[in-house]
Image (spheres, rainbow, N blue to C red):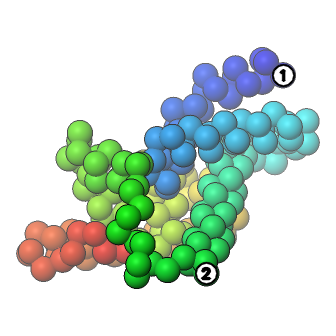
């Protein structure tokens, strides 16, 4: 198993880390999720049938782990909202984690990517990250996201349109760079 882990780590770790980081925008969370991906890969490697490339299979697992993380956050938020009076105590709770803007301050290009990715839906963000930041083909992206090729193309088109609109609004001074959909 160590050889399998070493192979995956040496070959795909940087791309995997960047993919998850672009999704969750927090270094510590990314590290935890990457570790979870590797655990799932090692547990299920014997079942890998080779119907796709190892990288596509790995990123498909990463996508599921990331989605599970977002679902758990939503459940946690929903429970907190049920039991917490935000009007009285909302200003008292400090947030210790860095904001995506703070993380991205080191590099203006990354900051712009973060800002404008917020204008995209989760599916659109996934397609943009996989296609342009991770350089996956349309077919590989479809396999990772469990989409049809047609859906990847449509989602990519809509994402690029949303990004273009956000950039133009930003240039013209009319856009809110922190908007999310």
Residue at point 35%, 53% (across, down): 99
Q: Looking at the image, how many numbered discs can be counted on the residues?
A: 2
Query: Left of 41 or right of it: where is 141?
Result: left
Q: Is residue 85 above or below residue 53?
A: below
Q: In the structure shown, which secondary structural element does the residue marked by tag 2 occupy? A: helix
- Residue 47: image x %, image y %? 91, 42
Give residue 134's position: percent from left, percent from top: 48, 45
Residue 69 lies, in percent from the top left, at 64, 58
Q: Give the residue at mark 2.
A: 82
Q: Which residue is mark 1?
A: 1
Packing grade of label 2 (10 A; few <14, some 14-19, many >=20) is few
Single out the mark in the foreground, 2 or 1.
2
Screen quadrant of the C terminus: bottom left
How far apart, in angstroms, are the residues tagged by discs 2 and 1?
Answer: 44 Å
Q: Is residue 11 left or right of residue 163?
A: right
**Depth order, front residue of 105/124:** 105
Q: Residue at x 60, y 78 (%)?
A: 83
Whether the residues at callouts 2 and 1 have beta carbons within 8 Å, the answer is: no
Vertical placement of 122 versus 87: above or below? Answer: above
């Amino acid at each position: 198993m160590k050889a399998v882990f070493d192979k995956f780590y040496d070959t795909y770790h940087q791309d995997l880390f960047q993919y998850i980081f672009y999704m969750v925008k927090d270094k510590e969370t990314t590290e935890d999720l990457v570790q979870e991906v590797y655990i799932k890969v090692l547990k299920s490697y014997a079942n890998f049938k080779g119907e796709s490339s190892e990288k596509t299979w790995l990123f498909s697992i990463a996508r599921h782990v990331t989605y599970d993380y977002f679902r758990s956050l939503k459940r946690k938020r929903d429970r907190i909202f049920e039991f917490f009076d935000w009007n009285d105590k909302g200003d008292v709770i400090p947030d210790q984690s860095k904001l995506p803007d703070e993380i991205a301050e080191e590099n203006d290009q990354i900051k712009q990517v973060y800002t404008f990715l917020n204008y995209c839906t989760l599916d659109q963000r996934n397609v943009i990250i996989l296609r342009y930041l991770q350089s996956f083909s349309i077919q590989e992206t479809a396999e990772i996201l469990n989409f049809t090729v047609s859906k990847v193309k449509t989602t990519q088109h809509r994402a690029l349109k949303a990004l273009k609109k956000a950039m133009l609004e930003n240039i013209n001074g009319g856009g809110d760079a922190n908007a999310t959909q």
